Image: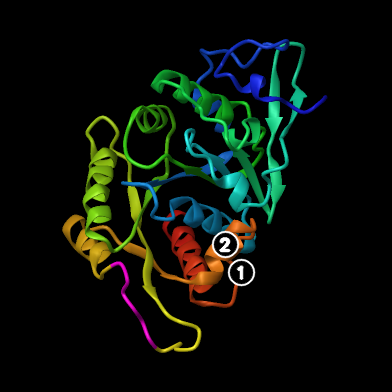
Amino acid sequence: MGKLDYSAMKPMQPTAKKQIKEEEPLIEGLKDVKHVIAIASGKGGVGKSTVAVNLAVALALEGYKVGLADADIYGPSIPTLTGTLDQQPAVEPIDDQLEVFVPLEKYGVKWMSIGYFAKPEQALIWRGPLAGSALKQILVQTRWGELDFLLIDLPPGTGDIHLSLMQEIRLSGGIIVTTPQQISVADVEKCLNMFFHKDLETRVLGIVENMSWFTPEELPDNKYYIFGKGGAKALSEKYDIPILAEIPLVQSVRERADEGIPSANDKHPAGAAFKELAAKVIKLLL
């Protein structure tokens, strides 16, 4: 079949082919996925999506079957970070009533994002229910196949999308991404309280502190704490949650991200940190 255009992704609206029925349990679309992990942050700009992409690639490098769903409906960045911005998932029929999206595959990971169905400059002006429905469509109607890990890159903050997802999917756990800045740490506490809410009660696997320090290439033994120091440690001690990784600020990570190339296999401190993060996730869940 031909490639989809954006109109095919209007949340749960009928197309020429009937979409998966609204009453179908969301978990059914993920029945062959062993572990679903939510990647969250209290605020934007902390590198959450960069961490999610590199964790996915690092897990794949260890031989696991991995997928990543971009749930950041209003600011999808996975297509840019993976160099798949000019591509679009194909659609395949299951029978005369159902059809599924085929995720893109690159770097050993299956990728799916709302960004594949909208122009980069297009604003998605959707209210909460429509945004949640679009996310549901991406998750349920994607042919993930058998996966060891499915990472879900959540929008920053807390809101309808987070609640809908956490109520309908049995998550193996969440990973919270922050920076050492005090404003980021304060917002992370709100995010943690969402995971701990009595109606959600989702396990938090740990905290990732991104941009922990900067080390110039010409001064490899020096660490400059540009964004402060100790933010993740304070949260870890207060809530008894482990720090899974402290990822340094490395210029090449930003440059390669702009080019759509993950840094998980790079031979620099950030690459090593992404591998360490993957190793800890594997140990926690397998």
Q: Tell me the tag on residue 33.
A: none
Q: Residue at x 41, y 20 (%)?
A: 127
Magenta highlight range: 222-227
Verify CB contact (< 8 Å) between mark 2 and mark 1.
Answer: yes
Q: Answer whether residue 225 is magenta in the image.
A: yes
- Characterize the magenta stretch by its predominant secondary structure: loop
Q: Answer whether residue 246 is magenta in the image.
A: no
Q: Residue at x 61, y 49 (%)?
A: 80
In the depicted structure, whether residue 89 falls above or below residue 249: above
Q: Quadrant of residue 163?
A: top left
Callout 2 environment at 10 Å: few (<14), some (14 to 19), or many (20+)? many
Quick one: label 2 or label 1, which is nearer the N terminus? 2
Label 2 belongs to which residue? Answer: 58
Residue 137 drawn at (x, y percent): 56, 24
Label 1 belongs to which residue? Answer: 265
Relative to the observer, which residue lies in front, 146 or 99?
99
Residue 49 drawn at (x, y percent): 48, 50
Q: Is 82 left, or right, of 223 in this rendering?
A: right
In the depicted structure, whether residue 189 falls above or below residue 170: below
Q: Is 158 left, or right, of 264 in this rendering?
A: left
Q: How many marks?
A: 2
Callout 1 environment at 10 Å: few (<14), some (14 to 19), or many (20+)? some
Task: Name the kind of residue labelled 1 in the image.
Answer: Asn
Relative to the observer, which residue lies in front, 75 or 149?
75
Residue reaching furthest to the front: 121
Q: Residue at x 28, y 38 (%)?
A: 201
CA gap between label 2 and label 1 equals: 7 Å
Residue 220 drawn at (x, y percent): 45, 87
